[in-house]
Structure formats: C-alpha cells, structure tokens
Image (cartoon, helix red, strand yellow):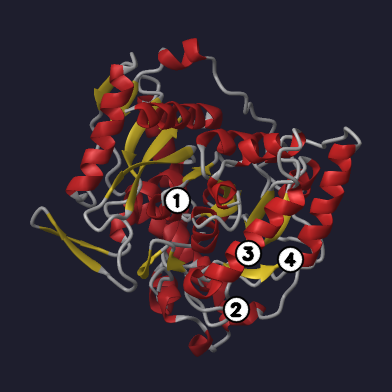
Amino acid sequence: MSELLHATAGELAGKIRRKQISSRELIEACLARYEARHSAVNAIVDLAADEALAAADEADRAVARGEASGPLHGVPLTIKSSIDVAGRLCECGSNFRRGRRAQRDAVLVSRLRRAGAVILGVTNTPDMLMSYETDNHLHGRTNHPLNQAFTAGGSSGGEAAAIADGMSAGGMGSDGGGSIRVPAHFCGIFGLKPTPGVIPRTGHFPGCSGPGGYMGLIGPMARSATDLQLLLEATAGPDAGDAQSAPAPVTPPSAEILKKLRIGWYTDDGVAPVTEETRSAVERAATLLESDGFDVRPYEWTGMNGAIDCWWKLFGVAARTLVEPMIGGKEDQVHPLSWELLATREEAERMSYPEFLDAWVQRDLFSARLAKRMEDFPVLLCPVAAVPAYPHGQREWTIAGRKATYPQVFSYSQVFNMTGNPAAVVPVGRSAEGMPIGVQVVARKFADATAVAVARKLEVLLGSD
C-alpha cells in the first residue's frame, strides 16, 4: 500500500470508484503512516480515526451500490486546525483557545464532504498562526518530513508536512502572508492562495474581516496541480457568511486560450535577494514554458516600492491591535516565535488612525498598479521565498554577498496577499541540502484556474524534462 500514500487524490478516487482499492484500505494505510511517523513529523494534532474509518466504510458501501458521491469519493483529507471541523480541535496553537472544539463544519469542509472526501483530522499550526515556522505550546513543533532539523514552514506547516509525508492525500490551509505557499514550497507540494471571495472563509479563526478580509484566504494544498483544481472546484462558490464571497469562474481555460497568455518572470523584487538555486528554479520554469510555445519574457518588478511596508501595517500591526484584548497582559502565554510576526505594543500604539487609513488606501493603489501591468503580462513566475526550507530558528542569510533577514525573505509571497492576486506553487528544484524549491505562478484576480492551469502545464513539462 505504500505507493498509495503518494498518489494524487484524483488517482485515488478513481481507484476507489473502479474497486481497485477500498476507501477503508486507503484510510488504514494513512493511519499506519501516521503511527509510524507522528513522533518524527508531528503534523496531525487531532486524528479522527474512528470517524474516518466509519466514513470510509460508508463510501465503500456507496461504491457497491453504484452511488459514488463525487470527485473526492473516499479520499482522506486533512484540514488546518484554524478551520472548523465538527468535533475536532480548533485551537490555532494558542493557549487562549486550549481545548476549543468546533461545533460544526466550516462551509468549505461541508463542501468537501459532499464531494466525497473523508476528513482524517486537523493539522498543526504556529501559535495564533503568526509564524513561518510551526510550533506552539499546545502540541509542539512540526518538523520537515525529509529532515527533522529543518522547518516545514508556517502557518500551514502541519498541513504541508502531512501531505508531503503521505499521511493524507491533500487538504486545506490558510494564507495571510504566504502561509499556504511557503510550506508548500518548503515541503515540495502544490498550493493555491485564491483570490479573496472565491473560497468562503466562514468557519476560520481568526475571522477574515477588516484588514484580514482582503489578505487572509483559505486554499487547497495537494500533491498535484490537478488536485488543486479538484479542491478548488469542490470548495469555491459564494456563502452568506463571508462578506467578500462572490460567484467566480473556476473552470480551467482551454489550451488554446492558455497559450495566448504572455508570461513574465522575475527573481528580484528589490526587497530580498534569492539563493542561486531559487533563481535557477524560476529560470528553469520559464525556459520549459517557452520551449513549449508560450510567450515568456523577463518582467521588471517596478512600481511596488513600499508594498511590503504596507502589508506589515495591515498584517503585523493590525494583528497586534486585534489580539491585544485576548492576550490581556498574559504575554508569557504566547509562543516566542509568534512575537516575530506581531508588532510590538508600542508600534501598534504609534500607528495613528490617518496612517492606518493611508495604508488601506495604498493597498488598493498597489493592487490597481499591478493589475494594470498584468494586462500585458496576465501570468507571472517568481520565487515563493528568497530561501528554501532552513534549520529551525535560522533568522539570517547571506545571499550573493547581501544580508537577508526574517521575515524579509518571504516578501515574494506577502505582496500578493496585499494585492489580492491568486498564486499557485509548483515544486521545480532542490537546494544543496536536498530541500524542495517551489516556483510561484501568479495570475490576475479571479483567474485562479489560470494560475492552476499554468502550474499543471509546468508539472507535466517537468515530468517529461
């Protein structure tokens, strides 16, 4: 059964429908993998073994009756523990939510179940989701599946590690500054940060409203771009609980339309220098697409000076203001890693109301500026981060003689939370230490399926390269 643990969700659903395997066999294989690897990786924090086996048995009975329920029939998925799964822990790694269990499924979880998915459990996060490493006082640290001394990323690090290590066939994470894309990049899987409004965030903690209503998204994580599309189609669509949700197209563009899209690529955003392997991965992706007949050209990342500072004001400073009442003077209850992505109290108090409003306005201006440029370049290729996965706790890098620091090295992801563009991650290369390196595929707003389609094209080209 070991080969099943790294098959795609779509492949597994097909095997179940054709009775080549049973859903129970698949769930049992994932549970065995969890038992063998949990102590080393620590990805899943609340395993729903009995419920998953019962759901698998029902899925198998449905197949026997000729009533397979959907494209994910009988397939095990995991969900980041900031997203409600009925009866499961939804603690966000925080002492202030210790023992909190969801009363009902988030809207997107209900949609996954309707598509036939079996929910295997919920995955580890940093404390309050505020770190690019996954560690907290409740469940401890998630390690990289390939090397326990390295981080799997954050804040969807548990989700990425579970999928990469074969514990689940796919799942859902959330992303406010790269929290889907960075762990996908680190762990060598695929991920999608959607456009705001495409996948409803009803049932996510913290609530995605106010400044976070534009920047905080829920999106799929998987072992193939085809699975990203499956999960996108299964979860997309309006919901009254999400003020920004909207009916958005998620059908993939035809091959003919896709080939007409000009693709730009860049490896320098003027904020953080990238490693040579990272640069090579982006250039390799561009070369493969160009050799396949796409119009691929170098793109100059201009007109975005100050964009990351704007993101920080709406993410780090606003987040500190929002969590201050919850912390209530109990700073010692917050994990040390999370303070690195929260502004200090003094910084939050210094930001005036006019300055906050100006940041909100500037965000829209940056978004519009990029949208205008993407009329000529509807798709962009760029790094996910300046560095691949690194040893736990590393905070400085020297790259091509330049110093880069944490969280500066994640500017390539942060900017697209601010602009609202959908961005997919496809694994392309490896670092000198053997860590995966992903490339980010960015599309125009509400062209989520285009980003996934280009990622799928790259996946195919890489497979035949």
Q: Which residue is mark 4?
A: 48
State which mark lies toward you, 2 or 1. 1
> In this rendering, would 263 be left or right of 417?
left
Whether residue 112 is visible to the viewer of this picture, yes or no, is yes
Mark 2: give few (<14), some (14-19) or many (20+) Cα within 10 Å: few
Q: Considering only vertical position in the picture, is 353 above or below 358?
A: below
Q: Considering only vertical position in the picture, is 372 above or below 225?
A: above
Whether residue 301 is visible to the viewer of this picture, yes or no, is no
> Which residue: 28% across, 18% down?
291
> Which residue: 69% across, 37% down?
15
x, y (%) of residue 278? Answer: 25, 46
Mark 1 to mark 3 CA distance (whole Å): 23 Å
Q: Which residue is mark 3?
A: 32
> Which residue: 78% across, 57% down?
105
Asked if disc 2 and disc 3 are in contact, CB closer than 8 Å, the reply is no
Q: Residue 168's quadrant in the figure?
A: bottom right
Asked if disc 2 and disc 1 are in contact, CB closer than 8 Å, the reply is no
Q: Residue 363's quadrant in the figure?
A: top left
Mark 2 to mark 4 CA distance (whole Å): 33 Å
Q: Which residue is mark 1?
A: 184
- Name the amino acid, label 1: Ala
Dot 4: what SS?
loop
**Sequence-wise first label, 2 or 3:** 3
Mark 1: give few (<14), some (14-19) or many (20+) Cα within 10 Å: many
**Sequence-wise first label, 2 or 4:** 4
Mark 4 to mark 3 CA distance (whole Å): 13 Å
Quarter containing the C terminus: top left
- Name the amino acid, label 2: Pro
Q: How many marks?
A: 4
Using the image as rendered, state which of residue 4 and residue 287 is in the foreground: 4
State which mark lies toward you, 4 or 3. 3
